[in-house]
Amino acid sequence: MITLFRYNWIVRDEWFELCKQIPNKELLHKRVGGTGSILYTFFHIIDVEYSWIRGIQGKPDIQVQFEEYESLQQVKQLSDSWRNETHEFLNSWTSEFEKEVVTVPWTDEHYTKGEILRHVIAHEIHHMGQLSIWIREFGLQPVSANVIGRGLFKNNVPQTH
Amino acid sequence: MITLFRYNWIVRDEWFELCKQIPNKELLHKRVGGTGSILYTFFHIIDVEYSWIRGIQGKPDIQVQFEEYESLQQVKQLSDSWRNETHEFLNSWTSEFEKEVVTVPWTDEHYTKGEILRHVIAHEIHHMGQLSIWIREFGLQPVSANVIGRGLFKNNVPQTH
């Protein structure tokens, strides 16, 4: 599971790098479908990941407003700063967590921790797929969605990044 | 891991159902980005999944031509027929397979079986994200990408479907 988080982060950073070529106005441009804009897509996946990871740990949710992060650089900084905590949590993950049931502040539903991790992983991949369509408008080649060929499984030991 | 295959199959079937509302001509219509068309996206994810799953097992690749599957019904039938073999293989999966290294007929690279499973999972989620943008053109609401809320983790035992 943790490998797919690392995959998402590598892909996310490649997308940040690619999107440096796009004017901020275009990153904020309202598009049909998805979360509505390229920049908001980044903000959304970062916010969703962090909220669930804090929720799993029984920590209160941190509310952030997109209006305060309306540049690529600001969103990237948010991503970097929150990732450390998530990384630390994932490093402490053991298979016993899989079936532990938790509730989170924004719903009365009960979920297992394993279910939440998978939800967060799929959530980001899904939204990156949307970016891969929008990016064509700028004549750019999207970031590869390949899991293979990224050195993620070298020596088969988890690596920090 | 296997749960995310089940997730992909449930989502795929919901997409098949949704796309029944779209004329075949539109499903074949050449679009910018992704694999080029809605129908070819389905064909591609099914083909890629089956090829890797057979490759993992050391079985020869089966070549199929899209020209023989140019309706939603035909592609859905292909999906259904190949899924049984994949399902059977995944049911035999144990954690020992994770680090076993294999080669497949179409590349000289070496991959672990665990790496391949994750690649196949992410591949489909990525392409479904692309469909979620294209589908808006028809005024339709895309299939939910949520992993939670699908009963996938009920009683925490793998279920056939």
Image: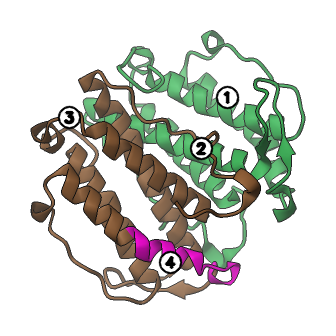
Chain colours: A green, B brown
Kind of residue sitting beneath label 3: Ile
Residue B88 circle label: 4
Q: Which residue is mark 2?
A: B150
Q: Is residue B135 above or below residue A96?
A: above
Tell me the distance, in whole angstroms, between the alpha carbons under discs 1 and 4. Answer: 37 Å
Image-based side of A32 in relation to A16, left or right: left
Image-based side of A43 in relation to A114, left or right: left
Q: Residues within 10 Å of mark 2 (few under 14, many from 20)?
A: few
Residue interval drawn in magenta: B83-98
Q: Is residue A51 above or below residue A101?
A: above
Kind of residue sitting beneath label 1: Asp
Q: Position of residue A145 (x, y in %)?
A: 44, 53
Residue B53 circle label: none
Residue at mark 1 shares a chain with residue at mark 3 = no
Q: How many marks?
A: 4
Q: Which residue is mark 3?
A: B22
Q: Which residue is mark 1?
A: A47
Tags 1 and 4 touching, CB below 8 Å: no
Kind of residue sitting beneath label 2: Arg
The image quadrant that residue B46 belongs to is bottom left
Between B42 and B99, which is closer to the camera in this rendering? B42
Spot the residue most to the top: A67
Q: Residues within 10 Å of mark 4 (few under 14, many from 20)?
A: few
Tell me the distance, in whole angstroms, between the alpha carbons under discs 4 and 2. Answer: 22 Å
Q: Is residue A43 above or below residue A128?
A: above
Circle 1 sits in a helix, a strand or a loop, which is it? helix
Residue at mark 3 shares a chain with residue at mark 4 = yes
